[in-house]
Amino acid sequence: MAAPLKVLFVASECAPFAKTGGLADVVGALPIALRRSGVDVRIVMPLYAGMPWSEFEVLDGSLVVPMYWGQASARVRVGQLPRSDVPIYCLEYNRYFDRPYLYGPPSQGYSDNLERFTFLSRGALEICKALGFIPDVVHCNDWQTALVPVYLNTFEWAQPLHGTASIYSIHNLAYQGVLESGALFITGLGREHYNPGEFEHFGALNLTKAALYHSTLLSTVSPTYAREIQTGAYGCGLDGVLASRSRDLRGILNGIDVDEWNPSTDPFIPAQYDARHMAGKAKCKAALQKEAGLPVRDDVPIFGLVGRLTTQKGVDVLAHAMERILRWDVQLVLLGTGDPDAEEFFKRAEHERGERFRAWIGFDNGRAHRIEAGGDFFLMPSRFEPCGLNQMYSLRYGTLPVVRATGGLVDTVANYDEATGGGTGFIFNDLRADSLADTIGWATSTWYDRPDHIEAMRKRAMAQDFSWDRAAREYEGLYLDAYARRRGHAHGAQTSAA
Ligand code: ADP
């Protein structure tokens, strides 16, 4: 039998060890699903402060990583992703990673981030050579790993890794790794790479642009976002580059952790339930109202929102719609952290409208679960949304999403059809406060007037399959295509996508 496909994941975060967003969830889950279908997948990431380093085994010897200033000598620790045998190699280099934040304090990056992630990118390839693990494909994720495909085509070209294909996955195009042009020397690459095809972009150094040029194939986290980022409205300046590689760019919808987000086993919620036994959901609603200090009533719909309070998530639009929404007999609970202005606004609104609105400023996973379980509806008025996880959690919990038609929200939520009762949520197009309020009004009136439709939508929503196994099958296909592209012949592995 042919050897299994070998894949190395390189990432700057991985749940549950280090997380700032959805990227960590992907890196913590997709490799497990790939492993189940026979792919030899391993992960490389930094060892950050706060990770359970003592549970990881130290590998013998030290890893030498070439840097522009000389040779960095790092320790490598190996552990496993929880509930799996997926190896995770952590680069221990305290000068770069023993810090309070992954990337820097809120809304600031560390000034040496290019150096830190150059180290990660080169270090990942050095680990492969040191272990004798020569991957068929290196799967890179966002700008922190954008140099890997470049190194495969330059420093590693005549080395053991020359046949290794690269996949570059865009989790959020808003973060591209943009630096002033003089910083190129930190990557160790020669000045000849500073040209408009590779790193140069409007007079600055752009790491993502170079990755888009050098990677064998590209992916992003939903089919709609894959299309959107090729347009001026969503391409963040790289739409032209992405459009030029349109045929090599695939949108693969993220899965969710269906064990963590399962209303029939969830330990964070006061009563478990499933599509056939919904009594628990009513208890969760009452408990959520109580927790929020709102009137405990089953005859009023409750809307939830959990997420970063940033313009990406459209919370500014919600802020403008609040006055109209809270005139109706509805309840609204919000959990999030983010822009200080937004936090302040929602706290003030709570002060003024405490009988209908509760704002929790903070990060609280258990409470996020209770909002998903206790809500009737879940709001995501996103300006853009590469994939989005919360709408999938909501669907699984029978909490109907109210979303703007963008990115992964389009690919996961089906709009309510008044004629047939079809759909799984409520969708609006224009990012305006009135459109959001109208749509919340539409969901509210449906809740009051057509409870049979709401019940049918809930059941349909809860039956959707968002498991990682589906996504893993698509990634396997992508890896095999990348392999064939790089080597000029197909891989012989007996994987399910072969
Ligand atoms: P993004 O990655 O853009 O922030 P996603 O919807 O893809 O958005 O993923 C966000 C994840 O972080 C979800 O798992 C969500 O529940 C969680 N999350 C965000 N903010 C909070 C918060 N304040 N408390 C608890 N969980 C949160």
Image (cartoon, helix red, strand yellow):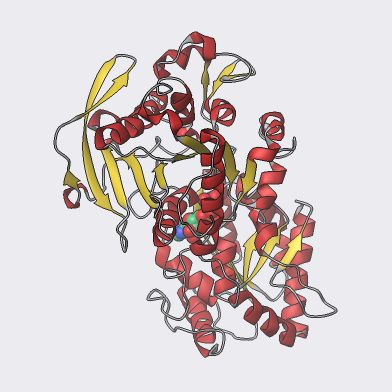
Would residue 199 be found to the left or right of residue 452 on screen?
Answer: left
Q: Is residue 407 above or below residue 418?
A: above
Q: Position of residue 162 (x, y in %)?
A: 43, 28
The residue furthest right is 419
Q: Is residue 174 above or below residue 179?
A: below
- Residue at point 43% right, 50% down? 27
Q: Is residue 308 visible?
A: no
Q: Is residue 2 above or below residue 192?
A: below
Q: Position of residue 278 (x, y in %)?
A: 55, 87
Q: Position of residue 205 (x, y in %)?
A: 54, 19
Q: Position of residue 149 (x, y in %)?
A: 48, 30
- Residue at point 41% right, 63% down? 365
User: Which of 246 and 383 lies nearest the eye of the viewer?
Assistant: 246
Would residue 469 be found to the left or right of residue 101 on screen?
Answer: right
The residue furthest front is 1
The residue furthest top is 191
